[in-house]
Amino acid sequence: MKEFKNVCVLKVFEPDEKTIAAIEKAANDRGVWADVKLADGDCSITVASERDEVAFNDAVKDIFALCGDKLYSDAGESLAEKVVETLAAAGKTVSVAESFTGGLICSRLVEVSGASAVLYEGAVTYSANAKIRRLHVKAGTLESYGAVSKQVCAEMLDGLVSTRMSDFAVATTGCAGPDTDEFGTPVGRCYIGVADRDKKEICEIDFDEERNGLRRHAANTALWMLLRFAENIK
């Protein structure tokens, strides 16, 4: 990229096509340069101007307004960096139980300097037996609803929270393909949950991506959910 006098990198999670188009138009209307890169749900918006600082600042304000509450950083930080920063500032820790994401969430976190202050543990409970043994998911729940279900995700979260060793819990379970499971779960269906000792939030999401793209997108979604969950805890 050429040298610019004024540069700002904004990070946004899952802006839709309409928002991206509006962001590009806002920059163009102000006569500044903007580059939007979206990968696995995570979006980086670089806004730059060679000379006109007033137009640059106005463009950034316009884009801030367009991004709304999906904006998570105005300093180019990754989701993992923002999660570590937010938890560390609050003196909070997190435990993670991953099935189809296979450790990607923990890997993202430990790439960040200072992760040891916030990541208590991570468990890749890929098999049904691991979910039962490590997280105390009930065999009856697995038999009734299948591993890829809101009910199992909830019990995975409960298994982490019940130890009372960390402040937050994150859990993922999904069908990464290439085939459906014995319950006919569609490929791309996943459940991602976050919890503390008082409440939990679980999302059902259907991703239309290849196996590893699905896993990357789900890991980013889990970090985003954890970030928003943690920011709302007083």
Image (tube, rainbow, N blue to C red):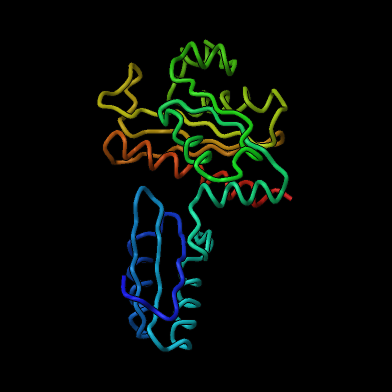
Q: Position of residue 106 (x, y in %)?
A: 51, 35
Near-viewer residue (202 or 161): 161
Judged left or right of residue 177, residue 49 is right
Near-viewer residue (207 or 88): 88
- 7 versus 111 height, above or below: below
At a point 40% along the width and 88% down the height, the residue shown is: 51
Q: Position of residue 56 (x, y in %)?
A: 44, 82
- 141 versus 94 height, above or below: above
Tell me if I can see residue 62 in this picture: yes
Near-viewer residue (86 or 217): 86
Q: Position of residue 192 (x, y in %)?
A: 49, 36
At a point 57% along the width and 45% down the height, the residue shown is: 113
At a point 64% along the width and 32% down the height, the residue shown is: 120
- 150 versus 9 height, above or below: above
Q: Indicate the quadrant containing the N terminus: top left, top right, bottom left or bottom right.
A: bottom left
Tell me if I can see residue 26 in this picture: no
At a point 52% along the width and 25% down the height, the residue shown is: 151
- 229 versus 33 height, above or below: above
Q: Position of residue 143 (x, y in %)?
A: 46, 12
Near-viewer residue (5 or 228): 5
